[in-house]
Image: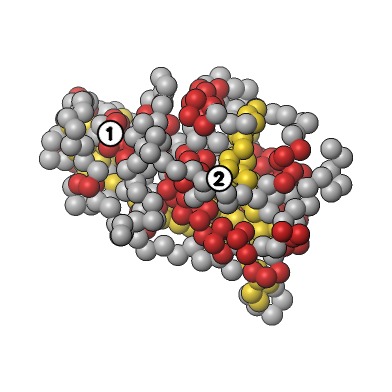
């Protein structure tokens, strides 16, 4: 028996997607990482919403969704009978690698060419959709920085708004390396369970409040970098000149290096075979180096580290960018499996839907 619930190395052609656990719709779906997780867990992902045209092109090419759109007021009736509404609102405003508070409330232009947007309001757009669709369960993913510093007040607003939309809410900080993912990626998951179906799953948290119980403790065996090292002679690019010059100052935890005038030039890590890969970023192809080979990490290793299928079609997109921006599929699969096992599988049929009730469709 495998020591991992879901294998981190897999292919679409050999995967079995049962689609018998319930319906999911994914918002801010990126290239499809979370969608593949739900599929691995047996859910039927009936569609997506993604504003980035290049990411949506990849999504459609690999998932062929029944419904896909950027923005649509007249939503199909099927979306009003969802088991899970999934979403990963853009998170750069809260990332510890970004400007954080300096960027809050500011409009930003995406490099892909979309219109200006204030990123830190998009979470509330997601909640507005949940309020309209009233899925049984809401799952929203974001960066760890959402739980730190001034961002905790923002997270409190998110909780309050989702509770006002009719949900019991909890916030979980999960580490992908404990969930069968070969990278130490920490992410926040805001999970809501609709109040009118929650009674069988509630505990008394304190004298005044009830909330749901959901076991999301994972303790799968850690996967060291040596286990995903490429053994098929894939091309491995040489280090950049800057990384060669600064090789001695970086270790597995990483180091930044500066130009002669003191400004930050870049950041890279030397990956040790016996350690777990740190969070894979959108630039890890350049910034991650294989220690014993003094060369860059290659696409084969990036795909396995991100738990994407080996035969995924990335079209003409940079693989590290897409994977660095995505939720690892197996991370989502683990959460989705627990939601099915502990909640959805135990719900009575007559409690499963309030579709169309007062929705005017």
For residue 340, above or below residue 244: below
Label 1, label 2: how far apart the Cα atoms are: 28 Å
Residue receiving disc 1: 300
Which is in the foreground here, disc 1 or disc 2?
2
- Residue 287 seen in the figure: no
Between 231 and 72, the one lying in front of the other is 231
Between 316 and 268, the one lying in front of the other is 316
Q: Residue at x 69, y 80 (%)?
A: 207
Residue receiving disc 2: 19
Quarter-wise, where is residue 314 in the image?
top left
Quarter-wise, where is residue 96 in the image?
top left
Give the x, y percent position of residue 327.
Answer: 46, 43
For the N terminus, give its image quadrant.
Answer: bottom left
Give the x, y percent position of residue 180.
Answer: 36, 53
Give the x, y percent position of residue 151.
Answer: 56, 51
Q: Residues within 10 Å of mark 2 (few under 14, many from 20)?
A: some
Q: Residue at x 78, y 52 (%)?
A: 354
Give the x, y percent position of residue 65.
Answer: 58, 31
In this rendering, would 86 be left or right of 357?
left
- As helix, strand or loop, the secondary structure at mark 2 comes to loop
Disc 1 and disc 2 in contact, CB within 8 angstroms: no
- Mark nearer the N terminus (1 vs 2): 2
Quarter-wise, where is residue 288 in the image?
top left
């Amino acid at each position: 028996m495998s020591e991992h619930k879901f294998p981190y190395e897999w292919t679409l052609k050999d995967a079995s997607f049962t689609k018998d656990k319930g319906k999911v719709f994914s918002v801010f779906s990126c290239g499809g990482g979370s969608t593949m997780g739900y599929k691995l867990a047996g859910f039927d992902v009936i569609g997506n919403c993604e504003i980035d045209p290049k990411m949506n092109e990849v999504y459609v090419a690999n998932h062929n969704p029944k419904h896909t759109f950027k923005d649509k007021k007249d939503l199909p009736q099927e979306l009003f009978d969802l088991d899970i509404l999934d979403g990963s609102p853009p998170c750069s405003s809260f990332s510890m690698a970004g400007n954080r508070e300096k960027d809050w409330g500011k409009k930003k232009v995406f490099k892909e060419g979309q219109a200006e947007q204030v990123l830190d309001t998009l979470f509330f757009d997601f909640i507005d959709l949940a309020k309209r669709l009233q899925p049984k369960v809401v799952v929203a993913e974001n960066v760890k920085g959402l739980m730190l510093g001034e961002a905790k007040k923002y997270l409190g607003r998110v909780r309050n708004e989702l509770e006002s939309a009719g949900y019991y809410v909890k916030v979980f900080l999960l580490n992908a390396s404990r969930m069968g993912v070969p990278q130490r990626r920490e992410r926040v998951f805001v999970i809501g369970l609709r109040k009118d179906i929650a009674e069988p799953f509630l505990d008394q948290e304190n004298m005044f409040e009830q909330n749901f119980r959901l076991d999301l403790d994972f303790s799968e065996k850690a996967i060291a970098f040596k286990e995903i090292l490429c053994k098929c002679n894939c091309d491995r690019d040489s280090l950049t000149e800057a990384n060669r010059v600064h090789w001695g100052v970086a270790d597995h935890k990483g180091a930044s290096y500066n130009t002669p005038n003191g400004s930050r030039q870049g950041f890279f890590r030397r990956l040790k075979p016996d350690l777990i890969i740190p969070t894979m970023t959108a630039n890890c192809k350049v910034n991650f180096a294989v220690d014993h080979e003094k060369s860059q990490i290659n696409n084969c290793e990036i795909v396995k580290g991100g738990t994407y299928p080996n035969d995924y079609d990335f079209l003409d997109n940079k693989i590290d960018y897409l994977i660095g921006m995505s939720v690892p599929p197996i991370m989502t699969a683990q959460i989705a499996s627990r939601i099915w096992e502990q909640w959805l599988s135990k719900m009575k049929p007559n409690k499963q839907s309030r579709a169309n009730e007062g929705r005017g469709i």
